[in-house]
Amino acid sequence: MIHARGVAKHFLTRGARVEALRPVDLDVARGAFVSIIGPSGCGKSTLLRIIAGLETASEGTLTIESAADQRAGFVFQDAVLLPWLSAEENVRFPLDAAGVPRDEGDATARRLLALVGLQGFEKALPRALSGGMRQRVSIARALSYDPPLLLMDEPFGALDLLTRDRLNDELLTIWTATKKTIIFVTHSVEEAAYLSDRVVVMSPRPGSIKKIYDSPLARPRGERTKLDPAFHQLMADLRRDLA
Ligand SMILES: Nc1ncnc2c1ncn2[C@@H]1O[C@H](COP(=O)(O)OP(=O)(O)OP(=O)(O)O)[C@@H](O)[C@H]1O
Ligand SMILES: [Mg+2]
């Protein structure tokens, strides 16, 4: 679905040239769950933002096979919700902006909030929700306009481990139910190993792709995955590559 060839990025700030991403070749198949892992500053967010069309590449070509009018859904590290709108109104916001009729938007928002486990919180304002709940609202919002591609930039990085584990399982359930293609940036080897079909390891700043692992782990993932020696081997390989 995505083909990046020699995609690179530099920024010019006050006359200085900052190398953000060295040339990257990457293919992502439709429906795949791909994680990107690498040290801080190696260009993970930059790559994701280029794929999202929020940034343009300085070099190389990027091909995304999807209808031209379909934007990718983007989930940021910190949930960026409008504080004066309820959970339901935040999820509906992109639909309202696109002129989708009110009752249709309402139905979609309620369905998505249920999908992320937030039924009963439709009317809650963001300040009345926990960090994990706010992050689930932003996932529901990213799904609202049914994008074929979901880009997630360390979505669970700020959460405690138990909440993160629970949201990882919820995300896999959503991924299975919606058949989205997901590109997921993380700092956690465990998260990358647990979730993904492929794990892309990046080298330190300015980053490029160091290695790509195709996961040997069966689906569905669950408690059994965490006992699988292949899971521990994959994590050990990732830790070694990142060291
Ligand atoms: N708008 C910008 N202007 C100038 N330099 C930038 C800009 N955005 C990113 N950079 C630089 O590009 C490099 C890569 O940044 P990026 O945010 O992609 O890293 P990252 O891998 O996502 O890091 P982290 O794990 O800390 O989020 C860094 O050196 C950063 O300073
Ligand atoms: Mg980043």
Image: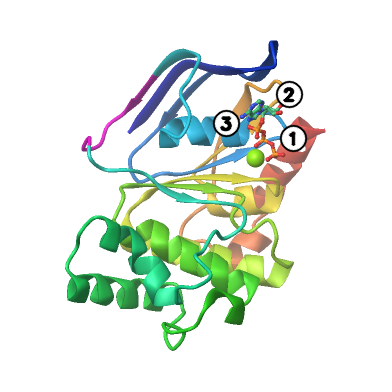
The answer as to whether callout 2 falls within 8 Å of ligand 1 is yes
The span from disc 3 to disc 2 (Cα, nearest Å) is 12 Å
Q: Which of marks 3 and 2 is in front?
A: 3
Q: Mark 3 points at which residue?
A: 46
User: Can residue 12 be seen in the rendering of this structure?
Assistant: yes
- As rendered, which of 151 and 55 lies closer to the eye? 55
- Upstream in the sequence, badge 1 or badge 3? 1
Q: Are marks 2 and 1 in contact (CB under 8 Å)?
A: yes
Task: Report if residue 65 lies within the magenta region.
Answer: yes
The span from disc 1 to disc 3 (Cα, nearest Å) is 13 Å
Q: Please, which residue is most extreme toward the bottom here?
A: 120
How busy is the neighbourhood of tag 3: few (under 14 within 10 Å), some, or many (20 plus)?
many
The answer as to whether callout 3 falls within 8 Å of ligand 1 is yes
The answer as to whether callout 1 falls within 8 Å of ligand 1 is yes
- Element at label 2: loop
- As rendered, which of 9 and 227 lies closer to the eye? 9
The three-letter code of the residue at mark 1 reads Pro
User: Can residue 170 be seen in the rendering of this structure?
Assistant: no
Q: Name the residue under label 1.
A: 39
Ligand 1 placement by image quarter: top right
- Upstream in the sequence, badge 2 or badge 1? 1
The span from disc 2 to disc 1 (Cα, nearest Å) is 8 Å
- Magenta segment range? 62-68
- Upstream in the sequence, badge 3 or badge 2? 3
